[in-house]
Image: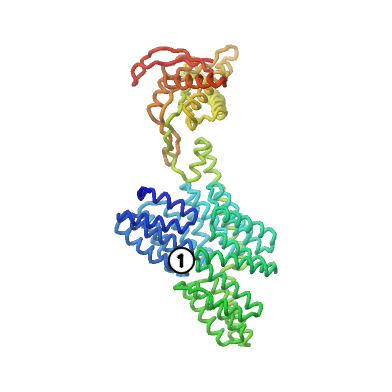
C-alpha cells in the first residue's frame, strides 16, 4: 500500500475517532510517525494519546498529551495546541484531577480568544463548565454551558449546540430537575440525529433511561437502555455497550431483580476486560463488591477487591477503592479500621473536590458513627450531609428559582434558534440551509450545471407609473410561481435581481440537468400573467419573458457574515446571462453546449424507444450572433 500523506491520515483518524476505534488510532499513529516530519510526529503523539482515552487509560494519555502540547508549541500551531490542551484537561478530569483540568481548560479558552478561534472557544467554555459540573458547582456549570451553547448557536455549530444541550441535561439531572433534564436530552438527541451521530444518540438515550430509573418508571428505563445498547451494538462501540450494561444493572438492583443486575454487571466487566478499559473494570468490581457487602458475603467481596486491577495514579479511583474497603471493614465488624479508612478517603475527596464521593463518604461516616454510638461524630457528619444536600441540590426555593431561570434561558435559546432557522430557510435554498445548520462550509463545484436567467420584458416602462404596492405584488406572484416550478423539477433558485430570476440544476448527469432546466423554462413561458390585472383592467397586455440558458461548470457558495447570500459564479453564469440579454421577447435562447445535451438526450431516448416530452425538445438554430465578452456564438431557440 502506498504511504499516505498526513492530510489523508488526518481524514482517516476523524472516522476512527467517530467510531471510538482505539486500535485503528494506534495504527494511524504509527503511520504518521513513519512520515518523519515534526508535524506528523506531533500528530502521532496526539493519536496515541486519544487511543488511550478511548479505553479509559487516562494515566497513559496524560504524558502523551503533554508531549504533543510541547511539540505544537514549538511548531506554532495554535489549533492543534488548543485541541491538545482540551484533551489533556479531559484526561485529567477523568482521573479526578479537577483543579489541574480547570487550569488547562482556562488556558485553552484564553488561547482560543487570542487567536480568534470562535469554534475552539465554544468547546473550551463547554469543557470549563464540565469541570464545574464535576466539582458540584452547578450554578457555575449552568452558566458555562449556556455561554458555550450561545456561542455555538451563533456560529451555526450544530455539534456544539447538541453537546452543550445534552450537558445542560446532566446538570438538571444532578439537581433532581428531571423534567428539565428530559427536555434537554430529547433536544440533544434530535440535534445529534440530524448530524447522524449515532454514538451520541446512544449515550443520550442511556441518560434518558437514567432519568426514568430515578423516577422508578422501570419499563420506560429498560426501553431507553435497550435502544442505547442496540445502537452501540450496531456501530460496534463496545465501550458504550459496557456502559449500558452498567446502567441496566443499576436499574435491576433498584427494581429488586438482583440476578438480572448481576448478569449485566458481568457482561459489562467482560467487555471492559476485553477492550482493556481498566477503569471500567474497577468500577464494575466495586459495584459487585458493594452488592456482596449488602448481602453479607464479606468473603466474596474481599476476593473481588483483591482481583481489582491496580488503579494507578487516578485520585478518583483511589478514593473509590478506599471507600469500598472501608465499607467492607464495617461489614466485617472492624469499625475503628473502617473509620480510619473512610476518613482518609473523605479527606482525599475533599482535597480533590470530588463532590459525589464527598456526599457518599459523608453518608457512610454518618452511618458508621451511629453504629459506633459516637454522638459527636454523628452530629458532625449529619450536619455535613445536610450541607452537601443543600449545596448540590439546593433548598426547594433555590431550586425553583434556578428552574425558572433555566426555563427562561432555554426559551430564549429555542426562540433564537427558531428565528435563526427561519431566516436561513427564507434566504437560502432549503438543502443549503440544512448544510449551514449542520455547521458545514458551503463551497461547491458543479461540473455540468444548467443555468437559467429569466427577465421580464419592458418591466421598467410598464411599472414606471404603477403604485409601488402593485409592483411588489406582481413580482411576488410571478416569482412565487417560478419558485414552485423550480421545486417541482428539482431546480435550485439562486436569487432575484430586480425583475430577473436566476436558477440552476445540478446533481444529475449533464443530460438530466439540461432536461430539467428546459422543462422549467417551458413552464415559466406558459405561466399566464398580464399587465392588465395590475394597471388597466380593460387592456389585455400579456407579460412577456426573455429566457437564456447555458450549461457548464459553476462555483456555488455562501458569501457574507451578517447577511448570508447564496450565489453562483463562473463563465457559465455570465454566458447564460448573455443568452437572456441577446434573446427576444417570449422566446428561450440557449447555447450550443446546452442544445447538444438535449440532442444527445433525444438520440439516446430514440434508440431505447423511451422518447417522451423531455427527450423531444424542439430546437431551431438561430445562427451566429455576436455576444459581448464571448465573440461570435451559435445559439438556438428552444421551442415546444
Quarter of the picture containing the C terminus is: top right
**Corner quadrant of residue 258:** bottom right
Q: Relative to 581, say whether 72 is above or below.
A: below
Instruction: Identify the residue at image location x=63%, y=88%.
Output: 373
Q: Relative to 423, say whether 279 is above or below.
A: below
Q: Relative to 157, say whether 491 is above or below.
A: above
Residue wearing tag 1: 57
Q: Relative to 151, say whether 600 is above or below.
A: above
Instruction: Identify the residue at image location x=45%, y=58%.
Output: 23
Q: Position of residue 475 (x, y in %)?
A: 53, 24
Q: Is residue 464 visible?
A: no
Comparing 108 with 477, the one in front is 108
Q: How many other residues sit within 10 Å of disc 1, few (<14), some (14-19) or many (≥20)?
A: many
Q: Position of residue 515 (x, y in %)?
A: 51, 24
Comparing 500 with 412, the one in front is 500
What number of labels is visible?
1
- SS at badge 1: loop
Which residue is the extreme one toward the front? 1
Q: Is residue 526 visible?
A: yes
Rendered image coloring scheme? rainbow
Instruction: Identify the residue at image location x=42%, y=64%.
Output: 61
**Corner quadrant of residue 418:** top right
Q: Position of residue 636 (x, y in %)?
A: 44, 15
Q: Position of residue 18 (x, y in %)?
A: 48, 53
Comparing 479 with 618, the one in front is 618
Amino acid at each position: 500500500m502506498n504511504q499516505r500523506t498526513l492530510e489523508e491520515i488526518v481524514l482517516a483518524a476523524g472516522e476512527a475517532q467517530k467510531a471510538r476505534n482505539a486500535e485503528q488510532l494506534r495504527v494511524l499513529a504509527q503511520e504518521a510517525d513513519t512520515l518523519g516530519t515534526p508535524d506528523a510526529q506531533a500528530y502521532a503523539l496526539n493519536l496515541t494519546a486519544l487511543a488511550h482515552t478511548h479505553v479509559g487509560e487516562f494515566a497513559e494519555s496524560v504524558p502523551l498529551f503533554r508531549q504533543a502540547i510541547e511539540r505544537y508549541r514549538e511548531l506554532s500551531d495554535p489549533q492543534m495546541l488548543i485541541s491538545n490542551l482540551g484533551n489533556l484537561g479531559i484526561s485529567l478530569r477523568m482521573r479526578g484531577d479537577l483543579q489541574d483540568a480547570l487550569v488547562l481548560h482556562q488556558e485553552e479558552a484564553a488561547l482560543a480568544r487570542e487567536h480568534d478561534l470562535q469554534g475552539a472557544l465554544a468547546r473550551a467554555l463547554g469543557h470549563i463548565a464540565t469541570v464545574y459540573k464535576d466539582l458540584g458547582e452547578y450554578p457555575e456549570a449552568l452558566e458555562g454551558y449556556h455561554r458555550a451553547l450561545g456561542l455555538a448557536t451563533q456560529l451555526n455549530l450544530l455539534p456544539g449546540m447538541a453537546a452543550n444541550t445534552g450537558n445542560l441535561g446532566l446538570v438538571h439531572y444532578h439537581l433532581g430537575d428531571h423534567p428539565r433534564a428530559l427536555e434537554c436530552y430529547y433536544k440533544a438527541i434530535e440535534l445529534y440525529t440530524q448530524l447522524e451521530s449515532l454514538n451520541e444518540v446512544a449515550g443520550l438515550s442511556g441518560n434518558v433511561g437514567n432519568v426514568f430509573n430515578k423516577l422508578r418508571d422501570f419499563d420506560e428505563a429498560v426501553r431507553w437502555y435497550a435502544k442505547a445498547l442496540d445502537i452501540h451494538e450496531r456501530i460496534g462501540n463496545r465501550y458504550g455497550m459496557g456502559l449500558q450494561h452498567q446502567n441496566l444493572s443499576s436499574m435491576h438492583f433498584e427494581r429488586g431483580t438482583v440476578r438480572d443486575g448481576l448478569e449485566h454487571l458481568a457482561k459489562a466487566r467482560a467487555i471492559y476486560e476485553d477492550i482493556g478499559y481498566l477503569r471500567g473494570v474497577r468500577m464494575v468490581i466495586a459495584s459487585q463488591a458493594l452488592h456482596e457487602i449488602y448481602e453479607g458475603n464479606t468473603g466474596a467481596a474481599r476476593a473481588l477487591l483483591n482481583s481489582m486491577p491496580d488503579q494507578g495514579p487516578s485520585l478518583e479511583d483511589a478514593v473509590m477503592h478506599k471507600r469500598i474497603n472501608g465499607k467492607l471493614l464495617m461489614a466485617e465488624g472492624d469499625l475503628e479500621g473502617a473509620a480510619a479508612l473512610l476518613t482518609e478517603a473523605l479527606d482525599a475527596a475533599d482535597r480533590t473536590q470530588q463532590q459525589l464521593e464527598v456526599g457518599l463518604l459523608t453518608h457512610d461516616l454518618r452511618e458508621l458513627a451511629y453504629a459506633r454510638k459516637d454522638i459527636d461524630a454523628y452530629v458532625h457528619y449529619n450536619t455535613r450531609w445536610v450541607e452537601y444536600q443543600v449545596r448540590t441540590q439546593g433548598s426547594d426555593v433555590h431550586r425553583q428559582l434556578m428552574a425558572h431561570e433555566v426555563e427562561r434561558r432555554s426559551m430564549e435559546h429555542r426562540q433564537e434558534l427558531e428565528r435563526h432557522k427561519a431566516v436561513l430557510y427564507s434566504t437560502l435554498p432549503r438543502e443549503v440551509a440544512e448544510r449551514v445548520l449542520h455547521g458545514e462550509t458551503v463551497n461547491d463545484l458543479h461540473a455540468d450545471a444548467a443555468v437559467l436567467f429569466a427577465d421580464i420584458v419592458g418591466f421598467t416602462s410598464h411599472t414606471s407609473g404603477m403604485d409601488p404596492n402593485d409592483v411588489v405584488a406582481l413580482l411576488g406572484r410571478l416569482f412565487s410561481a417560478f419558485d414552485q416550478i423550480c421545486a417541482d423539477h428539482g431546480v435550485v433558485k439562486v436569487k432575484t435581481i430586480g425583475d430577473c430570476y436566476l436558477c440552476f440544476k445540478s446533481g444529475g448527469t449533464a443530460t438530466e440537468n439540461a432536461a430539467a432546466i428546459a422543462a422549467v423554462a417551458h413552464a415559466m413561458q406558459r405561466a399566464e400573467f398580464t399587465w392588465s390585472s395590475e394597471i388597466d383592467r380593460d387592456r389585455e397586455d400579456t407579460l412577456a419573458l426573455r429566457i437564456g440558458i447555458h450549461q457548464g461548470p459553476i462555483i456555488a457558495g455562501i458569501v457574507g457574515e451578517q447577511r448570508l447570500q447564496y450565489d453562483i459564479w463562473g463563465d457559465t453564469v455570465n454566458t447564460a446571462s448573455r443568452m437572456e440579454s441577446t434573446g427576444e421577447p417570449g422566446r428561450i435562447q440557449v447555447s450550443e453546449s446546452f442544445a447538444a445535451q438535449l440532442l444527445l438526450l433525444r438520440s439516446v431516448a430514440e434508440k431505447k424507444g423511451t422518447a417522451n416530452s423531455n427527450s423531444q425538445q424542439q430546437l431551431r438554430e438561430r445562427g451566429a450572433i455576436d455576444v459581448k465578452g464571448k465573440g461570435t456564438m451559435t445559439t438556438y431557440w428552444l421551442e415546444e
